């Protein structure tokens, strides 16, 4: 594990060097993507028989943290590069072999934001529509998207070259993720690149390891740690600011003001407890799977709760820091400005926004579920 983390640590100077250009261009620089792929980012959740590393979720979380400390958008790329790898555990073997046997580093950009419309044809399904928030689309060879055909729901893989990337990513934060819309017009997808959402196949022969017996929410390891890093960086920025800043209208430095001290202390405790809770939940899920135990619905909900809480607690930390820092968060040349912007984006993400606390409670209380289907 240490060796793998070291490999990603080696490329962080390059990632950091291009962080500002990613903010300006709205996508990661190609040298950064190439370096991450070279370090193994696209093989973290890929099965070993396919040339993957098949790492445990905690190791993946550490990789995400390492990259996010250099650039939050680079940390997000861990999810871009691995979501399809985890989902591939229930894909037909022929589909898995076509995608990964010869090209284990092939990049698949995906979004479940808005299903396309499909029509059955003799050759497969003809797809039309536009899906949003397709992070990393400019660097991907494939596009994975849900679609509906009548009452049935499916996932399809299309060559990105056959799709149109729309320049729609003008977000306030997480600008370097390149999460543009992708339009598909009259593209036919062969049946061998289509999988059912309603009736998924069982595990294929490539995915027998412990990782693939874990609940699907171990995918949290690929992006939730970014929010923990933002909280960590916000606290560090406030600690440094407190030594030099004297707020307007007062004589004492920020470090001597009780309100700043209280907010920092609350933030530090919130950060540390949320990180421990999240890491423990990932470790427990992996240990349980390693013992051959299937996760119960309640245990899956517990993992979802830990991930949601890590995101929302991190957002609380950043808000506490912003309150204490005052006007130091409103200027673009201040490090806290981007932290606040990125955190605001991440805390509203559909997979871990505040409403998911309610989704977990629905599972625990036996109420109707509003979980996104891919999260159950």
Image (cartoon, rainbow, N blue to C red):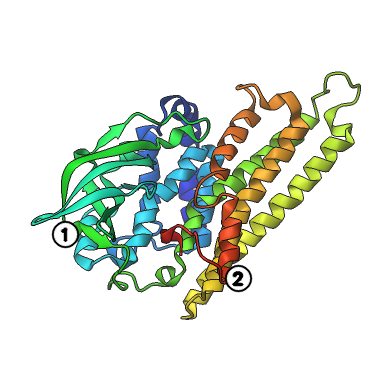
Whether residue 284 is visible to the viewer of this picture, yes or no, is no
Q: Which residue is drawn at 66% across and 59% down?
A: 276
The residue that mark 2 highlights is 365
Whether residue 125 is visible to the viewer of this picture, yes or no, is yes
**Of residues 338 and 122, which is closer to you in this image?**
122
Q: Count residues near mark 1 (Cα–Cα under 10 Å), then give few for <14, some for 14-19, many for 20+.
A: some
Q: In this view, does 254 lie to the left or right of 52?
A: right
**Of residues 323 and 59, which is closer to you in this image?**
323
Residue 165 coordinates in the image, percent (x, y): 29, 34
Q: Which residue lies furthest to the right in this view?
A: 251
Mark nearer the N terminus (2 vs 1):
1
Q: Residue at x 35, y 74 (%)?
A: 208
Residue 78 coordinates in the image, percent (x, y): 44, 48
Q: Count residues near mark 2 (Cα–Cα under 10 Å), then give few for <14, some for 14-19, many for 20+.
A: few
Residue 341 coordinates in the image, percent (x, y): 58, 33
Q: Distance between the residues labelled 2 and 1?
A: 39 Å
The residue that mark 1 highlights is 191
**Of residues 134 and 152, which is closer to you in this image?**
152
The vertical placement of 48 against 70, above or below, is below
Residue 374 coordinates in the image, percent (x, y): 41, 60
């Amino acid at each position: 594990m240490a060796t793998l983390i070291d490999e990603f640590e080696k490329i962080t100077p390059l990632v950091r060097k291009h962080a500002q250009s990613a903010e300006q261009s709205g996508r990661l620089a190609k040298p950064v993507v190439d370096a991450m792929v070279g370090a193994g980012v696209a093989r973290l959740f890929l099965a070993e028989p396919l040339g993957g590393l098949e790492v445990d979720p905690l190791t993946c979380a550490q990789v995400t943290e390492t990259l996010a400390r250099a650039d939050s958008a680079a940390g997000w790329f861990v999810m871009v590069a691995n979501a399809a790898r985890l989902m591939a555990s229930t894909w037909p073997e022929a589909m898995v072999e076509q995608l990964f046997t010869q090209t284990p580093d092939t990049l698949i950009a995906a979004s479940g934001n808005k299903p396309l419309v499909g029509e059955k044809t003799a050759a497969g399904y003809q797809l039309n529509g536009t899906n949003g928030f397709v992070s990393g689309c400019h660097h991907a060879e494939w596009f994975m998207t849900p679609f509906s055909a009548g009452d049935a729901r499916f996932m399809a893989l299309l060559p990105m070259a056959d799709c149109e990337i729309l320049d729609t990513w003008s977000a306030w934060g997480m600008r370097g993720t390149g999460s543009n819309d992708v339009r598909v017009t009259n593209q036919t997808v062969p049946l061998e690149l289509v999988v059912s959402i309603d009736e998924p196949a069982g595990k294929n022969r490539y995915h027998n390891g412990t990782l693939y017996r874990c609940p699907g929410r171990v995918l949290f390891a690929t992006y939730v740690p970014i929010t923990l890093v933002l909280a960590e960086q916000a606290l560090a920025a406030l600690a440094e600011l407190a030594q030099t800043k004297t707020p307007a209208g007062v004589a004492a430095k920020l470090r001597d003001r009780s309100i700043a001290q209280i907010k920092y202390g609350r933030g530090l405790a919130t950060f540390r407890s949320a990180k421990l809770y999240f890491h423990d939940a990932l470790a427990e899920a992996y240990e349980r799977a390693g013992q051959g135990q299937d996760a119960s619905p309640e245990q899956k909900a517990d993992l979802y709760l830990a991930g949601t809480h890590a995101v929302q607690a991190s957002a609380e930390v950043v808000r506490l820091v912003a309150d204490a820092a005052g006007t130091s968060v409103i200027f673009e040349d201040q490090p806290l400005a981007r932290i606040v912007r990125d955190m605001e984006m991440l805390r509203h993400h559909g997979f871990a926004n505040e409403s998911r606390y309610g989704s977990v409670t629905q599972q625990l209380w036996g109420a109707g579920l509003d979980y996104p289907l891919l999260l159950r």
